[in-house]
Image: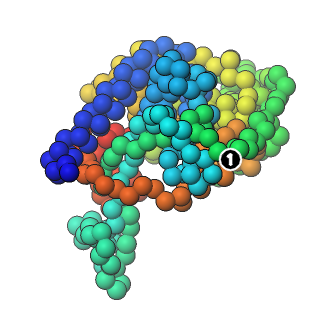
Amino acid sequence: MATTEEARAARDAKLDALHEQLTDAVESLVSGEDWKQALEFAARFRARSFNNTLLIFVQHQAAFEAGRVPEPEPSYVAGFKQWQALGRQVEKGQSGYMILAPVTGRFASFTPKVAESWRKLSRFEKPKPGEAVRSRMVGVRSAYVWDVSQTAGDPISTPPSPRLLEGEAPDGLWEGIAAQVEAQGFTVMRVPHEGMIHGANGLTDFGASTVAVRENMPDAAQVKTLVHELAHVLLHGPDNPDATGHRGIGEVEADSVALMVAAAHGMDTSDYTVPYVSGWAATVPEKSPVEVIQATGERVRKTAAAILDQLPTPQISNGDPPGLSRDTPAKKQTEPVVEADADPLTEEPRRPVGSSARGL
C-alpha cells in the first residue's frame, strides 16, 4: 500500500502532467482562427471551465488519432459514475480524459463579516449552534471524464439542434439579450444607420447608460452586435474592478462572448474575425501570454454562460449528456490535494497555490 508521501508524489506528477498539457494547448492558440475554434468548442462544453475544455479537446484528439474514438471531436462527456447513473458503462480499455477538479471544504463562523473569524470544519465536524456555514474551494485534484463514444449501454436521446436560415436570428433572442442590458440600467436603442454611432455596428455609452445598434443589417448581425455590447456592459464598465483596462483585449472579450452566445444558438460564426492571439496576449504588463489567454478565456466563458443561463431560447447542448444531474455522487476523495489559498468570505477563491491549479 502506498505511503502518504508516495500518494502525494503521484498526485503531484499527475497535476504537473496536466499543467504541461494545458500550457502546450494554450500556447498553440497563436492565431485568431485557433482562438475562434477554441471558443466554438467551449460553447459546446460551456458547463466546463475554459482550461478543462482545452484539456478535453487535446486528449480527445489524441484518442481519435490513436483510433480509440470514432469522431475527431467529443459530443457528451461525464464521469465514470455519472455514466453509470445514465445506464451506460465505460468500455474496457478506454482511458478517461484527465481534467482539474476542485476540492471544497466547509467553514464556520459566529461573525461572518469578520474574515479572521472563519474556521475550517473537519470532515465529520458539525457547526456549533448559531454559526454560519459556507463551502469554499480549498484545493485541486485530478479527475476523469469519458466521451459517450467510449461507453456502451442505454441510448442517449439527442435533442434537436436549432436550425436557422442565413441572416436569421433565433426567436426571442433579441428580446432576451435586450432585457439583460436593461437589467443593468441601460436603455437599448435601434438607430437607422451607422452614421449615427460613429460608423460602428453598435455603441455603448456608459455616461448616458445607452446601448445603440444600427438596424440596417440582417437580424442575426443585430443580435450578435447587441450581445457584443452586453459583454462590454458586463465586463468593461468604469466601475468594474475586474476590467482589464486594455481596449484591445476588451474588444477581443466582447467579440468572443458574442461568438460563444451565437455558437450556442447554432448561428453562423464564419463572419467573426478575432485578432491574432500573439498580438493582444503579449500586451499586459507583468503577465505572460499563457496567463492572459487563460484568464481571458475563462472570463469569456463565464460571461457567456451567465448570459445563456438567463435566456429561454433553444440552445445546443452544453456538453453534459441529456438527463445528467450534477448532483450525481462523485467519487470519494482518496488522495491528497493541492491546497488553495481560499478566503471563505469571498464569492470566488483566490488563485490556488501552484500553477497547476489555475482556473478550474
Where residue 305 sits in the image (x, y, percent)?
58, 43
The residue wearing badge 1 is 154
Q: Is residue 323 above or below residue 122?
A: above
316 vs 183: above or below: above
Name which residue lies at 55% across and 55% down. 326
Query: x, y (%) of residue 333?
Result: 34, 56
Badge 1: residue crowd in 10 Å (few <14, some 14–19, many ≥20): few
Left or right: 165, with 244 as reference point = right
Of the pair 229 and 36, the residue shown nearer to us: 36
Tally of numbered discs? 1
- Seen in the picture, residue 44 relative to 288 is either above or below; the reply is below
In what quadrant of the picture does the C terminus appear? Answer: top left
Q: Circle 1 — which element?
A: loop
Front in this rendered view, residue 182 or 140: 140
The image shows residue 59, relative to residue 279, as above or below, that is below
Image quarter of residue 193:
top right
Does residue 307 appear anywhere in the picture? no
Q: Residue at x 62, y 52 (%)?
A: 86
Residue 22 seen in the current view: yes
- Residue 145's x, y, as percent? 48, 41
The x and y percentages for residue 241 are 40, 44
Q: Residue furthest front?
A: 92
Image point 44% across, 14% down: which residue? Answer: 30
Query: The residue under label 1 is which amino acid type?
Result: Asp
Left or right relative to 282: residue 169: right
| Left or right of 293, for residue 149 | right
Residue 9 image-quadrant placement: top left
Q: How is the image coloured?
A: rainbow
User: Which one is in front, 232 or 198?
Assistant: 232
What residue appears at the point 67 percent right and 35 percent down from the top-left corner? 264
